[in-house]
Amino acid sequence: MSALAEKADSPLKKKPPSWSDIWLKNTKPLKHVVFTMPLQSLSPKDPKSQTLIPTFANIDRTLLLSDELLLQILSKLPHLQRNPNSLVCRRWLNLQGRLIRSLKILDWDFLESGRLLTRFPNLTHVDLLNGCLLSPRDSGILLTHRLVSMQMGSGFCSNRKFLEEDLLPVEVVDKGLQALANGCPNLRRLVVINASELGLLTVAEECLTLQELELHKCNDNVLRGIAACENLQIVKLVANVDGLYSSSVTDIGLTILAQGCKRLVRLELSGCEGSFDGIKAIGQCCLMLEELTICDHKMDDGWLAGLSYCENLKTLKLLSCKRIDRSPGRDEYLGFCPALERLHLQKCQLRSKKSVRALFRVCEAVREIVIQDCWGLDNDMFRFASVCRRVKLLSLEGCSLLTTEGLEAVILSWQDLENLIVVSCKNINESGISPALATLFSILKELRWRPDVKSLLASSLVGTGMGKKGGRFFKRT
């Protein structure tokens, strides 16, 4: 009985089983686990068998390089390869943005939101012209001009100024200029339209290294802001463009520009007004001016005489001018540019003998004359060029009224002529070449003689069977 009592009381006195007892006593259910673990680790096809530590081949080795060193490597690559490189990773995208120096803005929100300066912090050349235009992005109508290209809607009329009503407000443009100036203190070139004096003053104060400025739709008041940019060397002013927008730059604005920007080297005036006083002020104040371009000007009579005050001017370009100077004045008041070397006339109307004669008189020291697609240049007009005795290069293209006799009468008087280019001048032909002119051709350093394109084409087609009437090829059967 006592033994039975001890057996009945034994479960109460036993200790609770430990984990070791359970592990050693119940080994049967764990057998397949123990055996399957080494089998799975030895299986090469199981994706779980791959180690968590990557091999050296999978490591991004560029992470070991600093940003400065990687920037130097990326900068040595070709430009065509830079865009694909920016797609490698986010770090390369940010580094690639730091290499970009020049950018044309198409979306104004990109600038106003601050994404432009975050993405491209080292910009030096910025073009805001297309970004200032309010144009529909989904339109299939494209308006193309030599200054701008934009999309436009179908509800336009022919008598409206296209860009006049499709520009951002002046306040919005000034706000964008302020953000750009604060984020790009090293800005060197800027293209903008419809800005005000305050916006340009902000740029002048923040961007002390600004050297080139292209300003569209400007007026006299706006030029006060440009005058604060003391380091400007290249300026292009576009005041009025027929059919696009209209503005006015007079002698007041030209004087303000001349007195403020005395380091100008190149100046282009497009659609600007003015007169003798404005050109004179530029010549007297901008002593370093070497190149002057005048495009489609609206200047008063007598402005040609102001060019004589540009003593260091080397290049004079007249582009798309409907007139030169209707009343240039007497020869004794004209003067001339002593340092002038190049005279370029392109798409100008040379119909007034007084203006053409005065122009060549002012440019009598020139050594290079380039005339391209100018209307009205006949033998009588071209004869005035004989006053230029130091010409070494003459280029004529698209001068359809000039004949061989008129060309010969002038160039035979030029003793220093070395280069002659005649292209697409249909009234100049080889049959009219005299022995004296042929002798001159033989001693020239460069002769490009393609006056008549039709005869050149006909001679090149000899023996090919082309250029004949269709009856030769299409015979009736």
Image (tube, grey):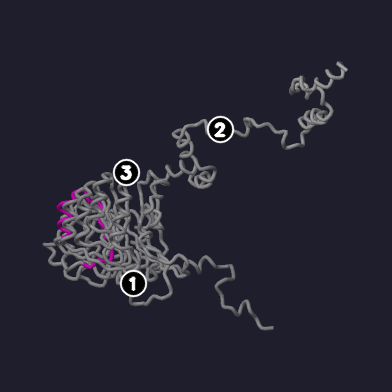
Q: Are marks 3 and 1 in contact (CB under 8 Å)?
A: no
Looking at the picture, how far across and down is residue 262, in whole percent? 19, 49
Question: Which quadrant of the rendered structure holds the N terminus?
Answer: top right
| 367 over 16 or under it: above or below | below
The answer to whether residue 473 is magenta is no
The residue depicted at 79 percent of the width and 22 percent of the height is: 11
**Is label 3 or label 1 in front?**
3
Mark number for residue 401?
1
Q: Residues within 10 Å of mark 1 (few under 14, many from 20)?
A: some
Q: x and y percent of residue 272 in the render?
A: 23, 64
> Which of the two labelled residues, at mark 2 and mark 1, occupies the earlier sequence position?
2
Is disc 3 surrounded by few (<14), some (14 to 19) or many (20+) residues within 10 Å? some
Q: Nearer the viewer, residue 447 or 243?
A: 243
Q: Amino acid at mark 1?
A: Leu
Q: Quadrant of the C terminus?
A: bottom right
Stretch in magenta: 278-298
Quadrant for residue 104, please give it.
bottom left
| Location of mark 3 (residue) | 186
Q: Earlier in the sequence, mark 3 or mark 1?
A: 3
How many angstroms separate mark 3 from mark 1 (CA)? Answer: 51 Å
